[in-house]
Image: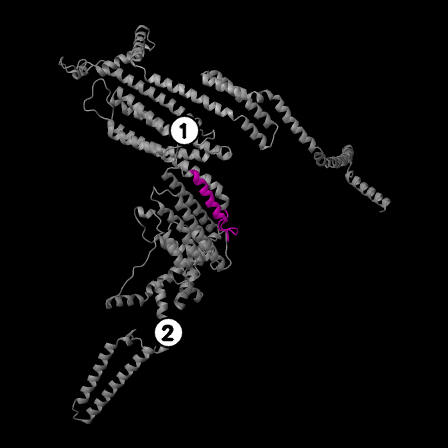
Amino acid sequence: MDMPALEEEAFSAAVKQVAAMLRRPDQLEKLSHYKQRALRKKLISKDVATIQKCSIQIIKELDEIPALKKKLQILHEENRKHIQCSTAIENLKAIYEIQETVDQTYELINTGKLLHAHQNLMELENARDNVMFEVFKTKAESLYDQKILADYFCELFKLADELSKQLWYIIGRTLEAVRGTDPGPQQVAALLVFLLNITFLIVSCSCIIPVFLTGVMFQLPMSMIDGKDMLGHVALGIDAQKLVADHPLLPRKTVTELLNRFIEITKNDLQDWLGRTLVQEKDVYDWYKGASPETDCYNQYYTPLASILFQMIDDQIQLGKEMGSETIPNILFVCVEEMLTFTNQYKEAFQAFYNKHFEDRSRFRYFTQTMVSIANVCLICVESSEKLKTNVRLSVQWESPQTSSTQVASPRPQSMRADLLQNIEQLKDRWNLNSQIAVKCLLSEVVTDITPQLALILSSKWLGTLSAVDTICFTIEDYYQDHCHLKASLLNSLLMELQIRVVQEYMKAFEARRLTFQNYEERKAASDQLCKEAERMKELFSRLIKQEDDSSEEFETVTSVLLAVAEVMSLRDKSLLALEVSSFVQKYPNISVEQLSGLIQMREDVGRSEARQLAQEITAQNKLRPKLQGKIANKNLAHVVVSKDKQQYRNEDDIKRLESKVTRKPNKELILHERKRKIELKCLEMQDLMTEQNYPEEEIQEKVGKYRALLRKKLEEEGDVDDDEEANEKKVKDSHIMAQMMQEKNDRIRRALNIKKDYVSGAAFKFNEKKAEMAEVASLNKNLLQRPAPEVEKKEETDEETSESSSTSSYSSSSSSSSTDA
């Protein structure tokens, strides 16, 4: 290497760099900055070299450690032995004295000194635990040492069993002695205690507020004044009810104020109790603590929320009966209104729990089980609300025939009854809505996990492998281990929504055209794979669904959508595509034009415009068909296989009717109408295209009119508006056009075979009619020959007629034979 040259080159490069940095006068101010940067780089390079050197030295020193460990292995073994020996020496006293202590404890048990025996047993157990702890601290891996210790202290278990037998024997004797004692003194003692309590209550001051005592004093006369023990006694002969009605104990205004105050207190108490119940549901029953909920006898998760809520209502009703039967409707109003408020609070609570879970899905371990219990509780509340509604309708008295003066008559009883029943129905609907929201939360959890696999459906990665569908099915089965604890109706609803969601992803994939095919083989492989996946999902959901609800048919209906789509995809003959798609739309009339167009465009032999036109035409035709009415209209009937009944044609009328259907003549007016309709469709397409391109309205009308006139002229001259005859044959779907084409084809064949126009198909096989015709011709010839001929001319004419008839018969026979050959 030429070092001077390299130094010169480096110097020149440095000069150029400095010249570039100091090109302008203002850059001189940064000269100190450049110097510091160069100095920093120099120091950094030195530090890097030093660190690298130290690292190499450390690595060399670390390489010596494995060899050092091998050298110290013997020292390690000796150290372990010395540790064991030191442990044994420290606990030598406990080890050598254990047998003596065991014998002493047996002697104490036999002499009945059980407390001393228990004390010795505790000391022995402590000594055993200390020795075992010291052994395990040494991390001894020898099972032999552990077995020696276990055998040495095995007498402790026998000693504990002996002590327990003595204790249980003494306890049993004590129970027998207690049960055999005469209960007389016990009853006397209990009676004395009761009398002392009564005496204390009478002598001592009352701790009850005087206002409450006043209310009780008023309540007792109100409920007992007309009883048999007071004014209603038979010996008095007084009409107590009439007396109370004429002279009430309390004014009506006072009673009304007391009842209103009672209802207000009830409302405040309910608000407090419901708030505490919600807190208890979240905290005590472990929404946020990560504990699994309880199961009932049907192996379904639940919490006692429903029983607590409706027990509150029942308690308030029972309390209201003491105040008077007509106060119950007002109490029910308050209870139902507070319950409606609670349903919203409960929904907000479990939705907040759901949102927190999806912020960090590893936070709540038993989220799925908790949501299952929430859904079950909401459904139980729906059933309890229905029972409450039935009880209110049947048992609550809304209008008493004889209203006493001490009771407040309920205003507008019928309207109150209707309002209360409506509120209870609203409460039932809200609980039902909460259960559906909980099911939606469970559904979203499953969908979140299978979304990456759903995105692969009908893509290039999907074709040729079932991994995506296998993962989806395994995920659903995994979640089913928790979902099976749902009630049957909720589980079936969840599985139905989940299945619909999966099928919707397939339809979205068709609409988005994620996959395009190059040939029929690829399309056939995709359709076969689609059939396999449909059968797999059908088997899965049919197995998971609970059979308490008769909804297996609906599940089969949903899975059959994919089978119908596979039939459209696997169709090889393009000429039958319109018929297949029309059948598909009849089964599923709710499919959109975009989805149907995307499904057709997946074929490699159909263009975009052609697919969209076909989808629009078939959808428009399907709208004109009559729709089903009633419940059957809301069901999907794709699983129903429509089979044509076998028909037997036994007489000539049936055969003629069948022949008339086969040889139907085309209706020229309908054919002309169809061709004019095509002209208008083309004009509308041209008008839409020009409108999209922002042409003026006048110019659009002018050009569309010229185009319409041109097409009509072409229709008059050529008889069709399509340019390509072959394409025209492919597009034929109208029965009259097909009949016309068939008639033209038959005319060409008839002219080629020299068959008359009045020839009837199958006449050559009618042997009886043919024999009768030949016999008639023969008899006619015979009569003509036997007739006398006075003149020669007549004879000649007769001969000519006979020859003509014979030639006619021979010609007819020859034509019939030729037609038979044809």
Q: Secondary structure at mark 1?
A: helix
Q: Residue at x 52, y 21 (%)?
A: 102
Q: Is residue 447 magenta?
A: no
Q: Which residue is denoted by mark 2 in the rendering?
A: 748
Q: In which quarter of the view is residue 335 placed?
A: top left
Q: Which residue is denoted by mark 1 in the rendering?
A: 345
In x, y percent, where is residue 450? 48, 43
Q: Is residue 473 magenta?
A: yes
> Which color scheme did the rendering employ for the protein?
one colour
* Amino acid on which the number 2 mark rests in the picture: Arg
Query: Mark 1 or mark 2: which comes first in sequence?
Result: 1
Q: Residue at x 39, y 25 (%)?
A: 277
Q: In which quarter of the view is residue 283 placed?
A: top left
Locate the C terminus by quadrant.
Answer: bottom left
Q: Nearer the viewer, residue 256 or 465?
A: 465
Q: Nearer the viewer, residue 820 or 739?
A: 820
In x, y percent, where is residue 701? 43, 56
Seen in the picture, residue 464 relative to 417 is either above or below; the reply is: below
In x, y percent, where is residue 26? 76, 35
Q: Secondary structure at mark 2?
A: helix
Q: In which quarter of the view is residue 437 placed?
A: top left
Is residue 27 shown left or right of residue 596? right
Mark 2 neighbour class, 10 Å CA radius: few under 14, some 14 to 19, many 20 or more: few
Seen in the picture, residue 658 relative to 596 is either above or below; the reply is: below
Q: Which range of residues does the magenta coloring cover?
A: 454-482
